[in-house]
Amino acid sequence: MFRRKNKQQGHERASEYATCRDFQQIFKEDMAGLHQLAFLLTADQARAEQCFVAGLDESIRGNPVFLQWARAWSKRAIIQNAIKAMAPAPEKHAAGPLEANNLHRPAEITEWPAFERFVFVMAVLEGYSLRECSAMLGCSDQDVITAKTSALARLGKHQPSAADHEDAPWAALTARAQVA
């Protein structure tokens, strides 16, 4: 469907674009991870499913994407749909994210403030840059830095037990966060 050949300096070179079938395969193979991404962002099962389906639809019907970028594009489509659905915005308060009343918030990521959760998932778990996060979320770089700092502080304060997170990959999550 989107396969094209370009001539460049007398050499024929194939530029392969992802097809509908490629995206369907990606969403099938990565269903659990993509759905988990949508759930971490939305913290709501029904909205996560909507973002997953909208992400698939957008990937299939969207602009042509090089095949090697299709997996990243699929995640980005889910993130963009979650942003549309949730409209996360930075919390505005005088003392900043580490004031005492914020330290008592629940440790579960899905219970964090939406903006902080989005920044954590995008910047730490998915590796988006500061600029990408601020552009996609429609906020300042400083808002992203503040939310990321607060999210990492929350992780540092919570030492989950095996009973708390038997089915959650908490150790891997914490390890990824510490690397970032």
Image (cartoon, rainbow, N blue to C red):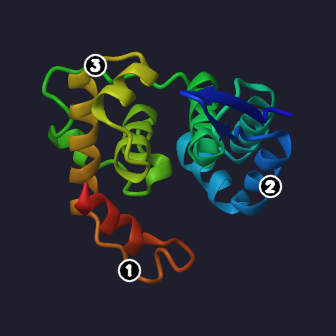
Amino acid at the residue labelled 2: Gln
In front: label 3 or label 2: 2
In the image, residue 37 above or below residue 19: below
In the image, residue 38 above or below residue 76: below
**Mark 1: which secondary structure?**
loop
Lower sequence index among marks 2 and 1: 2
Residue 28 falls in image quadrant: bottom right
Location of the N terminus by quadrant is top right
Amino acid at the residue labelled 1: Ser
In the image, residue 6 above or below residue 39: above
Residue at 64 percent of width and 27 percent of height: 7
Q: CA distance from mark 1 to mark 3?
A: 33 Å
Residue 83 falls in image quadrant: top right
Q: Mark 2: few, some, or many residues within 10 Å (few <14, many ≥20)?
A: few
**Mark 2: which secondary structure?**
helix
Q: Which mark is residue 92?
A: 3
Q: CA distance from mark 3 to mark 2?
A: 42 Å
Question: What residue is disc 2 on?
Answer: 25
Q: Which mark is residue 36?
A: none
Q: Residue furthest front?
A: 10
Lower sequence index among marks 1 and 3: 3
Question: What residue is disc 1 on?
Answer: 161
Residue 86: % across, % down:
58, 27
Residue at 34 percent of width and 49 percent of height: 124
**Mark 3: which secondary structure?**
loop
